């Protein structure tokens, strides 16, 4: 039986949503990568998913490199398609996985981008405290920096997940994994001001719900909405560039390790399954220490 491409994609998306519990943002990446491969199949007149051979995959890789895509982008597409075919094999919709033997391109070793404390102070200055949206933005920025949670995790926080007495938040992470993360006095103060004032005004006369962060219409704030807010704060501040989704998360981890936190604790707070994912930040802090030394030591 040959797998219909659109039906197969629909089944795979449902699998990612229900079984893997991936965020909508992650799922859209999978959808985009797989549809891109469907276009390649059409161009090459490949009849069905079970007709794709190893040499077709090699040709597809060549075309990706011809488009001048980064190694990271190519690796992501191959990973998406490998997972897709692994699912199709499980469901007996194909006989083999043509992506199984494809080697992933080596990644460029780039250190995580983060804010220095002085830069972060400028970002906080851009937040207003006298408007409902300003109170929300400050609370949002404070909680992201205080906890190091992912943007997708932040958008899912509900009022019932907060323990204001213990200053902790229950975070619903990847793969149904949950963890409690503490937050400090600055975040606590900003959350109280927002919940007791700004959030109530944003919800005034609208349908109530339990999501912590809301948009100007009173609805739950999405991942995309959070990114837009963070970039608007950058524009209001004296800083340049844009905030990518993980920059505050990187900053959280880097600042903890720079100030003496042990790696296992940072791993737990970030919700990393493997310590190797956290170890990259040791390189950041070592580089930070080196630059600080070279800039400030009289005989450097």
Image: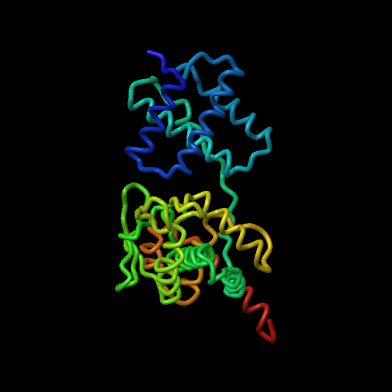
Depth check, front residue: 14 or 92? 14
Question: How many labels were placed on the picture?
Answer: 0
Question: Horizontal and vertical percent for residue 271?
Answer: 38, 58
* Residue 253 seen anywhere in this rendered image of the structure: no
Q: Quadrant of residue 178?
A: bottom left
Relative to 37, is 275 on the left or the right? left
Tell me the colour scheme of the image: rainbow
Q: Residue at x 31, y 48 (%)?
A: 176
Question: Horizontal and vertical percent for residue 73?
Answer: 58, 41
Q: Residue at x 61, y 57 (%)?
A: 231
Q: Residue at x 41, y 27 (%)?
A: 10
Q: Quadrant of residue 93?
A: top left
Residue 79 in the image: above or below residue 283: above
Q: Residue at x 42, y 45 (%)?
A: 23
Query: Where does the N terminus fall, quadrant-wise?
Result: top left
Query: Where does the C terminus fall, quadrant-wise?
Result: bottom right
Question: Horizontal and vertical percent for residue 45?
Answer: 58, 14
Furthest residue to the front? 205
Q: Quadrant of residue 70?
A: top right
* Residue 115 seen anywhere in this rendered image of the structure: yes
Residue 27 in the image: above or below residue 194: above
Relative to 14, is 141 on the left or the right? right
Furthest residue to the bottom? 298
């Amino acid at each position: 039986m040959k797998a219909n491409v659109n039906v197969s994609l629909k089944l795979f998306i449902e699998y990612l949503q229900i079984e893997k519990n991936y965020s909508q943002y992650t799922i859209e990446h999978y959808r985009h990568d797989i549809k891109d491969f469907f276009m390649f199949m059409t161009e090459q007149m490949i009849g069905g998913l079970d007709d794709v051979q190893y040499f077709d995959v090699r040709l597809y890789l060549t075309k990706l490199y011809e488009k001048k895509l980064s190694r990271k982008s190519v690796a992501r597409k191959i990973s998406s398609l490998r997972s897709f075919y692994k699912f199709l094999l499980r469901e007996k919709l194909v006989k083999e996985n043509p992506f199984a033997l494809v080697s992933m391109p080596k990644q460029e070793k780039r250190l995580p981008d983060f804010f220095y404390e002085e830069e972060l102070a400028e970002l906080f200055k851009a937040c207003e405290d006298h408007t409902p949206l300003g109170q929300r933005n400050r609370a949002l920025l404070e909680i992201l920096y205080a906890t190091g949670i992912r943007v997708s995790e932040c958008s899912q926080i509900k009022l019932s997940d907060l323990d204001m007495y213990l200053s902790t938040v229950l975070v619903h992470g990847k793969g149904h994994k949950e963890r409690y993360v503490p937050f400090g006095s600055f975040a606590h103060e900003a959350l109280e001001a927002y919940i007791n004032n700004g959030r109530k005004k944003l919800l005034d006369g609208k349908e109530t719900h339990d999501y912590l962060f809301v948009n100007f219409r009173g609805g739950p704030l999405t991942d995309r909405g959070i990114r837009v807010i963070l970039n608007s704060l950058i524009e209001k501040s004296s800083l340049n560039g844009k905030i990518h989704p993980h920059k505050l998360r990187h900053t959280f981890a880097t600042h903890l390790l720079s100030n003496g936190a042990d790696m296992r604790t940072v791993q737990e707070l970030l919700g990393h399954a493997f310590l190797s994912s956290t170890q990259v930040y040791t390189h950041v802090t070592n580089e930070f220490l080196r630059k600080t030394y070279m800039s400030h030591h009289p005989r450097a």
